[in-house]
Amino acid sequence: MDWQVILESLPQYAQGIRTTFILLGISLLSSLALAVPLAVARVSPTQWLTRPVWLFTYVMRGTPLLVQLFILYHGLAQFEAVRESPAWVLLRNPWFCAWLAFTLNSTAYTTEIFAGALKATHVGEIEAARSYGLGGFKLYTRVLLPSALRRALPQYSNEVVGLMHATAIASTVTLVDITRVARDVYANSLLVTESFGVAAIIYFVLTFTLVGVFKLLERRFMRHLQPQVQRPQAARANP
């Protein structure tokens, strides 16, 4: 184990962690903002609302994220109409293409997670809300969505961790993330353990941290779903 190579490469890994965090953060925020209204449309009884959302999630979940990223960054560039359009300013930027690919892919999975949670809402909650005069927009914002989002936390945490791991492919479009730093260190030192081993430890720590954060959120927002343990009453003394 060459500790000198590891110590010298730590500043590069720190930069890679920063890139990974930024890409993960903006992708999660944008996908979450898109997934909530799409999930509502997904469970709508109106076919012209639910069908397009179903098609979007079906296509995005049915194709690999790497392929989607390559199509956005490399594939669209071969069309002259795209290169001459105003959108080319964004589509030639690797940051934008990586963000767009991760956002669309995560939006598809998150939409299905939230839609499943909405469908699993107990009919009693809906009837109770309607008995208080809630309906339409207020029914969703005050009852259905808060309840569904709490129940979706365990599944959504898996999506967040999966997306964090998926950011490793951002290096294929020239972004200097953790994986790209590991590849550069390996190219300079030809030491596999020192280069990719450090990257593996970093990903493990990030995964452990994210899982821990979501465990705390689950304890906070899903406390009412936990079985209540009743303490045995003290036996009364016989008179």
Image (spheres, helix red, strand yellow):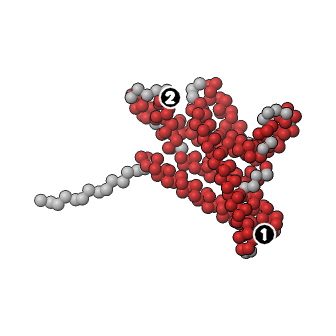
**Amino acid at dot 1:** Leu
Identify the residue under disc 2: 137
Between 59 and 217, the one lying in front of the other is 217
Whether residue 87 is visible, yes or no, is yes
Q: Position of residue 3 (x, y in %)?
A: 72, 74
* Residue at figure coordinates x 61%, y 61% from the top left: 205
Left or right: 167 as drawn, with respect to 113: right
**Amino acid at dot 2:** Phe
Residue 161, above or below 13: above
Residue 26, by quadrant, is top right
Q: Position of residue 78 (x, y in %)?
A: 87, 38
Whether residue 120 is visible, yes or no, is no
Mark 2 and mark 1 lie on one chain; the one further toward the N terminus is 2
Q: Position of residue 182 (x, y in %)?
A: 75, 62
Quadrant of the snapshot with the C terminus = bottom left
Residue 200, above or below 152: below
* Residue at figure coordinates x 60%, y 38% from the top left: 33
* Residue at figure coordinates x 46%, y 52% from the top left: 219
Q: How many numbered markers are drawn?
A: 2
Quadrant of the snapshot with the N terminus = bottom right
Q: Which mark is residue 191?
A: 1
Q: CA distance from mark 2 to mark 1?
A: 58 Å
Which element carries disc 1, helix, strand or loop? Answer: loop
Residue 178, by quadrant, is bottom right
Between 210 and 42, the one lying in front of the other is 210
Which element carries disc 2, helix, strand or loop? Answer: helix
Residue 218, above or below 83: below
Between 197 and 173, the one lying in front of the other is 173
